[in-house]
């Protein structure tokens, strides 16, 4: 590990937050008092990003010290065929288009067997909603992964897929979750939430489930004993008060059910999407603030993840000092953000993840999907070139 990034001397910290007009927020953060929506809005609007980052860093150190988590994971986007046409999405295709593809059980097994050298502990699987594949297709996606790697943790299906399965299965809610558990589902990723606000839903993803349905489905998932993550897609048409609304709704659901493992702000990539003309690539300034505000508002979320595919490895590394304690994993293949023009690579090897974490002054810890520690990494790395 390089030299650690320690919090500022308290007197200096006080001057920093005073100058930003955030002394009352500092006092709340220090005494563990929950921030209000108005506080959240001030954190978004102040130009004093260093003060916001400092507050988030204090909270991060209190919870996790200098540990920074990563995992050995594989992503499989098993089909890009999708019945929806969300404006922010460049990944979805209609059947018959040359770029449309669908993977079946044998394809998924083969893909999982390609990565023996990585010793992956997790496969992350999300995709389009294929209009002609039925309920059994989803169970087969999970079963195929388990056939190839019986020990792997299958983190699959956003609330959009879960809601779809509940509708098309012809079964009760209890039976659907029992089927998924029996097939080998371990947990659910946090996608599909986008921005939990009706205006943004109507303007950008109106055919797909909206805020209330996403939250209701997440409640069902957690009540049936599955852990899950939560995301927010930022950097398009949403406004600061809408981001606050999103975070407050997540926080309330976490108070109620307690099943969220991590919050992951997802930076929007605009290329080849229906928002290309309106969107801009998010800036480092915006990305750091999003991580920090997530850490400060979501006082009941244990983990804040800086997903390097969308943030870029450089920003994900910096985010570790703005409240994040996790940078996701090796990933290996990712299509959703790459179709929308991300400049990040498609995979990182374990040594590169460890190097990013160490260089920023943190202790790399390999974790499972559910944040059990597998290895505190102290071993020297191969020299970088
Ligand atoms: O739901 C779609 C987003 C999500 C774009 O839970 C876009 O550990 C940026 O949810 N630019 C899927 N983002 C990815 C996801 C995820 C990723 C990593 C880890 C976890 C986890 C979950 O990708 C979608 C949508 O919100 N997305 N299009 C785009 N143009």
Image (spheres, rainbow, N blue to C red):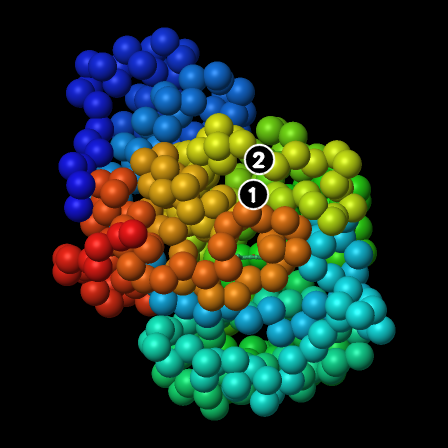
Q: Is mark 1 within 8 Å of ligand 1?
A: yes
Residue at point 21%, 59% (across, down): 382
Residue at point 70%, 77% (across, down): 102
Instruction: Please give left or right for residue 370 compared with residue 82 in the image.
Output: left
**Which one is nearer the viewer's eye here, 41 or 254?**
41
Q: Picture quarter containing residue 159?
A: bottom right
Residue at label 1? 267
Q: Is residue 142 above or below residue 291?
A: below
Q: Residues within 10 Å of mark 2 (few under 14, many from 20)?
A: some
The x and y percentages for residue 127 are 64, 67
**Which one is nearer the viewer's eye here, 382 or 119?**
382
The x and y percentages for residue 370 are 36, 65
Instruction: Please give left or right for residue 268 compared with residue 258 in the image.
Output: right
Q: Residues within 10 Å of mark 1 (few under 14, many from 20)?
A: many
Circle 2: element type: loop
**Ligand 1 quadrant in view:** bottom right
Circle 1: element type: strand
Residue at point 62%, 74% (across, down): 78
Residue at label 2? 282
The x and y percentages for residue 224 are 50, 71
Residue at point 40%, 59% (across, down): 348
The x and y percentages for residue 297 are 44, 36
Q: If you read the primary sequence from the N terminus, does the residue marked by circle 1 or circle 2 appear first?
A: 1
Disc 1 versus disc 2: distance between alpha carbons?
6 Å
> Are discs 1 and 2 less than 8 Å apart at CB?
yes
């Amino acid at each position: 590990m390089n030299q650690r990034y320690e919090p500022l001397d308290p007197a200096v910290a006080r001057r920093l937050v005073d100058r930003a007009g955030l002394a009352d927020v500092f006092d709340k953060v220090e005494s563990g008092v929950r921030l209000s929506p108005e506080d959240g809005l001030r954190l978004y609007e102040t130009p004093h990003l260093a003060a916001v980052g400092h507050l988030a860093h204090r909270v991060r150190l209190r919870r996790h010290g200098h540990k920074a988590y990563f995992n050995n994971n594989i992503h499989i986007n098993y089909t890009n065929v999708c019945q929806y046409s969300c404006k922010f999405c460049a990944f979805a295709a209609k059947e018959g288009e040359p770029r449309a593809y669908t993977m079946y059980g044998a394809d998924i097994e083969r893909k999982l067997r390609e990565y023996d050298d990585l010793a992956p502990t997790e496969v992350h699987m999300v995709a389009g909603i294929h209009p002609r594949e039925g309920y059994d297709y989803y169970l087969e996606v999970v079963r195929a992964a388990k056939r190839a790697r019986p020990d792997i943790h299958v983190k699959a299906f956003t609330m959009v897929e879960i809601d779809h399965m509940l509708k098309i299965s012809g079964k009760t809610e209890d039976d659907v979750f029992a089927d998924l558990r029996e097939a080998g589902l371990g947990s659910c990723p946090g996608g599909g939430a986008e921005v939990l606000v009706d205006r943004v839903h109507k303007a950008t993803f109106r055919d797909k489930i909206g805020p209330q349905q996403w939250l209701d489905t997440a409640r069902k998932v957690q009540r049936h004993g599955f852990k899950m993550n939560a995301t927010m897609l930022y950097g398009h048409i949403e406004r600061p008060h809408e981001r606050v609304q999103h975070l407050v709704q997540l926080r309330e659901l976490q108070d109620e059910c307690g099943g969220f493992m991590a919050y992951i702000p997802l930076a929007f990539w605009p290329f080849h999407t229906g928002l290309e003309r309106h969107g801009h690539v998010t800036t480092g300034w915006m990305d750091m603030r999003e991580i920090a505000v997530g850490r400060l508002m979501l006082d009941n979320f244990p983990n804040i993840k800086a997903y390097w595919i969308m943030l870029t490895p450089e920003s994900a590394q910096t985010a570790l000092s703005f409240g994040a304690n996790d940078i996701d994993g090796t990933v290996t293949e990712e299509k959703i953000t790459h179709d929308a023009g991300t400049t990040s690579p498609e995979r990182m090897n374990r040594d590169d993840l460890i190097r990013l974490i160490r260089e920023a002054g943190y202790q790399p810890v390999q974790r499972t999907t559910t944040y059990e520690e597998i290895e505190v990494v102290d071993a020297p790395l191969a020299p970088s070139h």
